[in-house]
Image (cartoon, rainbow, N blue to C red):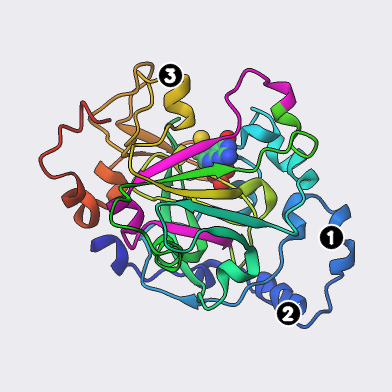
Amino acid sequence: MALFRGNLKYSDVTAKADFLNRRQIIAGTAGLGMAPFLGGAAQAAALEFTKTDYSVDEDVTPKEAATSYNNYYEFGTDKGDPFKNAHQMKTDPWSVEIGGLVDNPGNYGLDDLLSGIALEERIYRFRCVEAWSMVVPWIGFSLSEILNKAGVQSGGKYVAFETLNRPKEMPGIGWNPRFPWPYVEGLRMDEAMHPLSMIATGMYGESLPNQNGAPLRLVVPWKYGFKSIKSIVKITVTEEEPPTTWNNLAANEYGFYSNVNPDVDHPRWSQARERVIGGGLFGKRDTPMFNGYGEDVASLYAGMDLKKNF
Ligand code: MTE
């Protein structure tokens, strides 16, 4: 549990001005009416959440970096494209279709889906398969809360996720027509039910900016970032392992599990080290097994050959 014992909270590293700004927003004095003209990141609204012990002893990535250096191919493949283009996505109204092997299937409006669920802040390490990393103060809750609401049936062995697929609002879809849209991802049921697996609705004290996956996304901190699918519109409980986008594109490079593993290199680059975003010229570090969450999740893979099941 070492990673949970750190006590650095986002509030400890947030400039006072940010907090004042947040209070102003809560008090309604910030011009929210202007938000649509200010670009993706500025549309965020302050959230109410509790602090938790989920933390790490590393510096939190500057918000400006985490919200402008993104992978969200629906808005383009350059790191700056999502920030530039994601404001075109309409996130209200939003609903999530929950189906498959569940007792309570349905098309749930966001408020309905989130009702009764308390938001909490969790500071997680986030490691992209491209060998860069961030430390992000997410706001959300365990994915299991939604799955328990849905009522997973005994035959449910996997959970499949799907992203919004709306070409008119997501220009990257048209720029990359051969990409197998919609973006899909999946987890094994025990991974999905693990308390670390999180649905995030916010980050840095505010609702998620569109480029980071508004209004709700997955965050699975011990897996490469591409498992953390954004802007979810569909959750399906399945018996079979569901297809996943990057595995469909290059099965020899991206496995279903995609656990962070410094001992299994990507065929085209090493995974032993990572570039810390916001860490400056010397911001390189060794990548720990399971991204540092081994004590909590290694048992999920007992007896499995992680070189084969990469
Ligand atoms: N989800 C969708 N729908 N489309 C994407 O292109 N990119 C993934 C993941 N989720 C992606 C996605 C990848 S490769 C990474 S590293 C993370 O989102 C990046 O999340 P961030 O931009 O919030 O850092």
Q: Nearer the viewer, residue 117 or 151?
A: 151
- Residue 265, compared with residue 146, is above or below; it is above
**Residue type at tag 2:** Ile
> How much space separates mark 3 and mark 2, taking CA atoms?
45 Å
Specify few, some or many for label 1: CA neighbours under 10 Å numbering under 14, 14-19, or 20 or more: some
Sequence-first disc among 3 and 2: 2
What residue is rendered at 42% in x and 26% in y?
247
Q: In which quarter of the image is the C terminus?
A: top left
Mark number for residue 35? 1
Instruction: Say if the magenta span includes residue 193.
Output: yes
Q: In this view, does 229 lie to the left or right of 53?
A: right
Which disc is residue 186 wearing? none
Would you name the residue on which mark 3 appears? 250
- Identify the magenta region: 174-203
In the image, taking residue 303 as reference, residue 187 lies left or right, namely right
Residue depicted at x 70% and y 28%: 173
Dividing the picture into quadrants, the one containing residue 22 is bottom right
**The image quadrant in which ligand 1 is located:** top right
Residue 170 vs 106, above or below: the answer is above
Answer above or below: position of 55 versus 68: below
Q: How far apart are marks 1 and 3 (CA)?
A: 39 Å
Q: Earlier in the sequence, mark 1 or mark 3?
A: 1
Q: Is residue 65 left or right of residue 152?
A: right
In this orientation, which residue lies closer to the viewer: 46 or 196?
196
Residue position marked by numbered label 2 in the rendering: 26
**Image quadrant where one finds the N terminus:** bottom left
